[in-house]
Image (cartoon, rainbow, N blue to C red):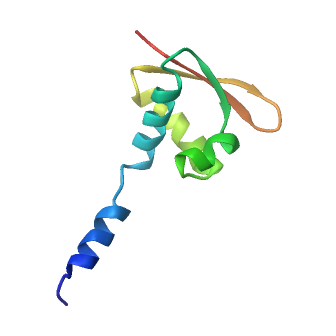
Amino acid sequence: MSVTPQSVSEASTSDSKPKDERLADYLRARVEDGEMYFKSKFIADDVGLSSKEIGALIVKLQESVDDLSIERWSYTGATTWRVEQTN
């Protein structure tokens, strides 16, 4: 099977940033002016992930991202997360 220019471009558009990087970049952009509180279900469309994926990734980001402080803030129907930049 030969690779056509069309199949190469399709492959490159489907190979976007890893999900955790997309989420971290989104959070960094949102906390430039201060802290942010969010529930996964409200940012899912903005990030292009499901709320379940965000919930799993945010726990990983808590341990792996040094420039953001991520903490579980409250739970009312769904977890609310608090994010701020660290200096």
Determine whether 1 is above or below 62 in the image. below
Q: Nearer the viewer, residue 68 or 75?
A: 68
Q: Residue at x 32, y 71 (%)?
A: 10
How many labels sit on residues?
A: 0
Q: Nearer the viewer, residue 5 or 81?
A: 5
Q: Is residue 9 left or right of residue 51?
A: left
Q: Which residue lies most toward the top here?
A: 87
Q: Pinpoint residue 77: horizontal percent, then vertical percent.
A: 82, 38
The quadrant of the rendering that contains the N terminus is bottom left
Q: Is residue 40 left or right of residue 31?
A: right
Q: Pinpoint residue 62: horizontal percent, then vertical percent.
A: 50, 28
Q: Nearer the viewer, residue 51 or 3?
A: 3
Residue 2 lies in quadrant? bottom left
Q: Residue at x 52, y 22 (%)?
A: 31
Q: Which residue lies most toward the left here?
A: 2
Q: Which residue lies most toward the bottom here?
A: 1
Q: Pinpoint residue 61: horizontal percent, then vertical percent.
A: 47, 33
Residue 76 lies in quadrant? top right
Determine whether 6 is above or below 45 in the image. below
The quadrant of the rendering that contains the C terminus is top left
Q: Is residue 62 left or right of residue 74?
A: left
Determine whether 32 is above or below 40 in the image. above
Q: Is residue 85 left or right of residue 36?
A: left
Q: Pinpoint residue 47: horizontal percent, then vertical percent.
A: 53, 46
Q: Residue at x 45, y 34 (%)?
A: 24
Residue 14 lies in quadrant? bottom left
Q: Residue at x 44, y 48 (%)?
A: 19
